[in-house]
Image (cartoon, rainbow, N blue to C red):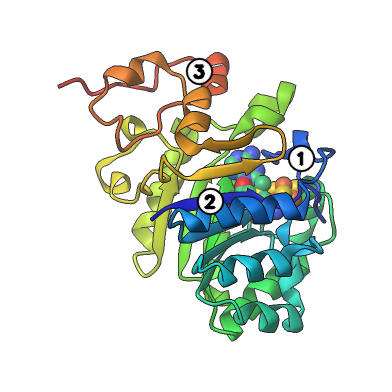
Amino acid sequence: MQELDVKISYQCNNACVFCLNKDKRQRKVLPPEEIKRQIEVFAENGGKKLVVSGGEPLISKYFLSLIGFAKQKRVSFLEIQTNARMLCYEEVIKKLKEFEPLTFLVSFHFPNAKLYKKYCRSDGFQQTVEGIKNLVKYNCHFGINTVIMKQNLPYLKGMMKTLKEMGATMIQYRFIDGKNVGKDYEKFVPRYSECLSIIEEIIRENSDINISLREIPVCVLGRESKKHLAPRLNPERLNLNSNRGLSTTEEIESSQFVFPDCKNCSYLTTCQGVRKEYVENYGAKEFKPTVK
Ligand SMILES: C[S@@+](CC[C@H](N)C(=O)[O-])C[C@H]1O[C@@H](n2cnc3c(N)ncnc32)[C@H](O)[C@@H]1O
Ligand code: SF4
C-alpha cells in the first residue's frame, strides 16, 4: 500500500532530550495548503495510507482539517504517532473516532512521572497514562512504541506489566537512534549486547502480547527474538519534510544505516543494518554478516 508520512509541525508539548526530531523543533511549519496539495497528489496516484507525526501532531491546530481532507480524498487509513497526552481528554478521542479506520502508535518510554519529567521534560506522564486508558476505553486500535535506551533498560519488564494491566496488546521496542544526544551518546545508547537478554526474557514471559523489535540488526538476535523482528518500513513510503520536500524511506535509511559489511549480508533485505553513529562509538565486533 502506498504511504505518505507527514510531519505537520515539529512543535511539541514535550521536549524529550533524546528525540530524533529535536534538532528540527525551530523549523518553520509547512503551510497547511502545501500539505493538502501533497496529500491530493498522493491520493490521485492511488495513495491509501497517511502517517501523521511530528513534533506532537495532536497539538496542531491544523490536525483535524488535514486528516479530514485526507479522508475526503479517499486516503482511507490513518496512523497517528503521538505521546498520547492529548488523548487524556475524552472529547479528543471521541472526535478522532469519527475518522476511523485509524491506528495510534503511542510513545511510552518511562515507568513513572519522575523519569518522564527528567527525560521528556514535562509533567505529562499522568496524561499519557490516561490517554492510553482512554484508547482502551474507546476501543481504539493502537500499539505502544517504547524506545530502548540505557535510561529505561532496568524498567522494561515492569513497564510491560503496567502496559498489560492498562490493556495494551501490541508493543514495539525500537532501539534508540542516538543522533541527537551528541556527546552523551554512551549515556543514552546501550550496546545491543546489554539489552538482548532483557528483551529475550520479556519475550519469553509475555507470550500473551504481540511484541515486535525495530532497528535491531538481525545478526545480534537469538533464534527466538529473530521471530519478533518487525518488517522493514515500506521503502517507497514518501516522507514530507519541511526542508527537503518529499523523500522516500529508502533514501532516508540509506544515509543513516551505513555499516559497509551489511552490503554482503544475506539478511540485508529483512534487516536495516547498523547506524553509522553506533559503529563510530562502539565499533563493529558485535555484527557478523551472514554470507551465503
Ligand atoms: C519524533 S516522535 C513524534 C510523535 C510523538 N510526539 C511521539 O513522541 O510519539 C515519532 C516517533 O519517534 C520515536 N522516537 C523519538 N525519539 C527517538 C529516538 N531517539 N530513537 C528512536 N525513536 C525515537 C517516538 O517514540 C515516536 O514513535
Ligand atoms: S513527545 Fe515525541 S516529538 Fe515530542 S519531544 Fe518527545 S519524541 Fe519528540
Residue 268 found in image quarter: top left
Ligand 1 has an atom within 8 Å of the beta carbon of the residue at disc 3: no
Residue 72, image x, y percentages:
58, 72
Residue visible at 33% across and 35% down? 218
The residue carrying mark 1 is: 17
Quadrant of the drawing holding the N terminus: bottom left
Q: Tag 2 or tag 1, which sits nearer the N-term? A: 2
The residue identified by callout 3 is 279
Amino acid type, residue under disc 3 in the picture: Val
The image's mark for residue 122 is none
Tell which of 121 and 38 is nearer to you: 38
Residue 236 placed where, x, y %? 42, 41
Q: Does residue 217 appear in this view?
A: yes
As measured in the structure, the alpha-carbon distance from the residue carrying label 3 to the one carrying label 2 is 30 Å
Q: CA distance from mark 1 to mark 2?
A: 27 Å
Q: Up-down: is 44 above or below 271? A: below
Could you tell me which residue is drawn at 43 percent across and 18 percent down?
Answer: 259
**Sequence order check: which comes first, mark 3 or mark 2?**
2
Q: Badge 3: few (under 14), some or many (20 or more) residues near its Cα, within 10 Å? A: some
Classify 76 as above or below 31.
below
| Amino acid at the residue labelled 2 | Leu
Q: Amino acid at mark 1?
A: Val
Look at discs 3 and 2 and give the one toward the viewer: 2
Identify the residue at horizontal 47%, vertical 52% (top origin).
Answer: 3
Callout 1 crowding tier (Cα within 10 Å): few <14, some 14–19, many ≥20:
some
- The residue beneath circle 2 is 4
Q: Work out whether residue 84 or residue 239 is closer to the camera in this orientation and state it.
A: 239
43 on left or right of 267: right
Picture coordinates of residue 176, whole percent (x, y): 58, 38
Disc 1/disc 3 C-alpha distance (Å): 22 Å
